[in-house]
Image (cartoon, rainbow, N blue to C red):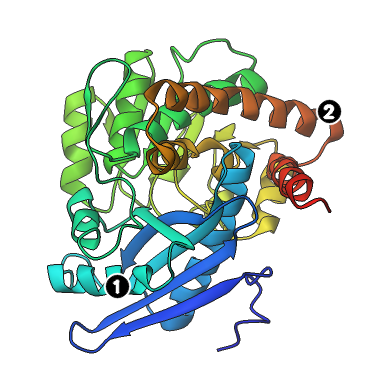
Amino acid sequence: MDVFTHPEFDGHEQLVFGHDPATDLRALIAIHDTSLGPAMGGCRMWPYASEAEAVTDALRLSRGMTQKSALAGLALGGGKAVIMGDPNQHKTPELMRAMGRVIDNLGGRYVTAEDSGMSVADLRTLGEVTPHVVGIRDYQRTDGSAHDGDPSPATADGVYRGIRASVRARLGRPELRGLRVAIQGTGSVGRRLARHLAADGVALSVADIHAASAQALADELDARLLSADAILADDADVVSPCALGAAINPQTRQQLKCSIVAGAANNQLATAADGVALWQAGILYAPDFAINAGGIIDVGSQYYGFDATDVDRRVAGIETTLGTIFERAYRDNIPPETIAEQLADERLAAHSGK
């Protein structure tokens, strides 16, 4: 397996392989760029089919975190950790502590947070052996409600605002009422996003590989329940991928009937060519690292000293940022993900003096 010539390598600073024989921990930490600050990104646990698949995921996700933090104006770099294993079968407190020791050995160059297959409780177990963990302490939001460190409410709020910006740019509509949004993935972010949209009078379609989760949300919000295989082909105005990456690929994009793709998942496009194809087909894509930045805004604030007002302001700014991206995309006839990458690279270059 080649790493330095890997198509997703992109000049990464560091790729760490972590192993603990006692717990059978097999993990990777990818640090992409620390120009703006310590590399921050979630720790994901997933039953990868191969080591090569895990490496690809870690490299892609960490690069996306660099772009996400830069575009959001945060003093953070990009990193990501992945643990190879089924979280429903292989996760133990001992495994979590072993992962915490791997993170701790990096001395703060990488700071971890929650991602797929991990919970706040898991992160707190990591925090028993390393201080380089965010998303585990209790805070108070601006509305007075309790915040246990979980960044998913901020992520969902940002995606909701991003959908509003997308609808204005593509459909010319100032409000969402009367539209249909198809949500792929009814985990913590997908559920919260669905509730935001339902409150705005949006008709919903929902699906998840965990059928019970999707059924419960459909019952709660009177949403159309679809299979995980059928949701992307739904006759909706907006398709919102909120599960794992590569949801939009050469096979699935042929099925799309929507005008907009705007969701919470990382790396929604399988390849850059898929984004170009969407643009040419007249489908507006909200770049994932722009629209789902609410989570890193939240945990970044926790790292530097939680400021709920600043979090709200920055998450609200996602709508403005996407508006700027879409305006330039239509003006210059360039796919919006290319514009978003340019804006992120401009901030990195300005900081480094290049």
Question: Quarter of the image holding residue 226?
Answer: top left
Residue kind at label 1, given as amino acid type: Arg
Q: Residue at x 53, y 36 (%)?
A: 291
- Reply above or below: 185 against 249: above
Lateral position of residue 121 relative to residue 53, left or right: left
Lateral position of residue 6 relative to residue 50, left or right: right
Say whether residue 173 is visible.
Answer: yes
Between 84 and 269, the residue placed more toward the observer is: 84
Q: Residue 239's spot in the image, x, y percent?
A: 48, 37
Q: Nearer the viewer, mark 1 or mark 2?
A: 1
Q: Which residue is mark 1?
A: 101
Q: Considering only order in the chain, which callout, 2 or 1, is on the residue closer to the N terminus?
A: 1
Task: Give the secondary structure at mark 2.
Answer: helix
- Reply above or below: 183 against 21: above
Say whether residue 269 is visible.
Answer: no
Q: Residue 56's spot in the image, x, y percent?
A: 52, 72
- Reply above or below: 93 against 5: above
Between 29 and 326, the residue placed more toward the observer is: 29
Q: Residue 116's spot in the image, x, y percent?
A: 32, 55
Residue kind at label 2, given as amino acid type: Arg
Q: Which residue is mark 2?
A: 331
Q: Residue at x 81, y 50 (%)?
A: 353
Report, in whole angstroms, how far the alpha carbon at label 1 lies from the one at label 2.
49 Å
